[in-house]
């Protein structure tokens, strides 16, 4: 009887051990935008490809729209291991101590998408991602969300139209300098709080790619949009270094392939989704969309030109120069 009990106990232990061995590796992927944005769709694409490539050995749980953490909280959560993966906007790395990432916030530094890709997909971009390792972070890829437009409840045709406006920005010294150069008062707010702040008049306006503006319904509380394309908004997909280094080598390789697929997918849909979002905003009739004339574009560039010089000490003159050269 005792022998039989021992056999049963051993069988149960083996069964439980097998169950533990088969338990999937969970990756919590948190982000702050809607699922139907380029970043949101790419996160879902990565989930699908990662789970397929690993045969279910990895389970990716995607948490959009600040469900888990707001802007300022998510980076700390990653470093502590509360989540494993994020795709924060590039401005988020400045407060972390990686000030060079704020170069992407400089107004008019990228004349085109191809100029941008020359940087993010070349040695400069790879080198910037590698510098995150000292922060306990592995940079996996750059994701794209295109160029930003300005919105407010008054027309913004010339730099002087910004005088006195309270404009929401991400936490970035470059973006602060940009808004002050236009005569506006920059207000740092979490992305999840922007709609209500616009609705209640806590801020007068903001800057965003059209897809973010439309999916967060900001156009419903903003009467005017200017197609300024003055700045760029992109993301870095990052993972907790301790978690990543602890993965089996074959799993890591499969996840890298899944990320490469999601990145190609994301780049392909980013411009399309922004174009569709702007058309949808126009169709609502709630927001007047304005295209700058060549003379007005020149005035904006002239007003914002000092920002680059002002930020050389913070970001690095050599890096700005290298990017300007590579972006041509």
Image: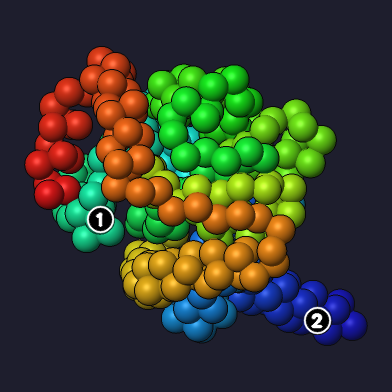
Left/right placement of residue 70 relative to residue 291 reads: right
Which residue is found at the position 52% from the left and 38% from the top? 156
Residue at position x 71%, y 58% from top?
286
Distance of mark 2 from mark 1, alpha carbons? 68 Å
Answer yes or no: is residue 291 visible: yes
Instruction: Please give the residue where the numbered disc 1 appears in the rendered image.
Output: 112
Occupied quadrant, residue 80: top right
User: Circle 2: is it few (<14), some (14-19), or many (20+) Cα within 10 Å?
Assistant: few
Q: Nearer the viewer, residue 21 or 139?
A: 139
Left or right of 312 in this view: 185: right
Quarter of image, res 249: bottom left
Instruction: Say how many tags the image has.
Output: 2
Q: Which label is found at residue 132?
A: none
Residue 63 x/y as whole percent: 67, 59
The residue that label 2 is drawn on is 8
Residue occupying the point 25% across, 15% down: 313
Vertical comparison of 76 with 260: above or below: above
Q: Secondary structure at mark 2?
A: helix
């Amino acid at each position: 009887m005792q022998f039989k009990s021992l056999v049963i106990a051993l069988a149960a232990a083996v069964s439980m051990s097998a169950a533990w061995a088969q338990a999937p590796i969970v990756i919590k992927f948190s982000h702050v935008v809607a699922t139907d944005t380029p970043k949101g769709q790419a996160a879902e694409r990565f989930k699908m490809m990662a789970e397929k490539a690993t045969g279910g050995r990895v389970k990716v749980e995607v948490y959009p729209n600040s469900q888990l953490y707001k802007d300022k909280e998510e980076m700390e959560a990653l470093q502590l291991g509360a989540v494993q993966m994020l795709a924060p906007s590039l401005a988020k790395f400045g407060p972390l101590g990686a000030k060079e990432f704020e170069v992407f916030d400089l107004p008019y530094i990228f004349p085109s998408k191809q100029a941008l890709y020359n940087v993010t997909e070349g040695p400069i971009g790879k080198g910037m991602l590698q510098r995150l390792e000292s922060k306990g972070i592995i940079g996996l890829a750059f994701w794209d969300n295109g160029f930003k437009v300005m919105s407010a409840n008054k027309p913004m045709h010339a730099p002087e139209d910004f005088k006195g406006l309270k404009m929401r920005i991400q936490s970035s010294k470059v973006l602060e300098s940009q808004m002050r150069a236009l005569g506006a008062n920059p207000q740092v707010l979490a992305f999840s709080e922007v709609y209500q702040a616009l609705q209640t008049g806590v801020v007068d306006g903001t800057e965003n790619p059209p897809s973010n503006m439309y999916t967060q319904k900001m156009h419903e509380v903003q009467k005017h949009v200017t197609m300024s394309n003055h700045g760029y908004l992109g993301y870095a997909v990052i993972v907790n270094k301790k978690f990543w280094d602890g993965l089996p080598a074959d799993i890591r390789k499969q996840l890298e392939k899944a990320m490469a697929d999601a990145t190609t997918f994301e780049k392909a849909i980013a411009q399309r989704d922004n174009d569709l979002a702007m058309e949808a905003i126009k169709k609502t009739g709630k927001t007047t969309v304005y295209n700058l004339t060549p003379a007005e574009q020149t005035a904006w560039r002239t007003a914002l030109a000092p920002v680059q010089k002002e930020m050389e000490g913070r970001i690095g003159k050599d890096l700005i120069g290298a990017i300007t050269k590579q972006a041509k």
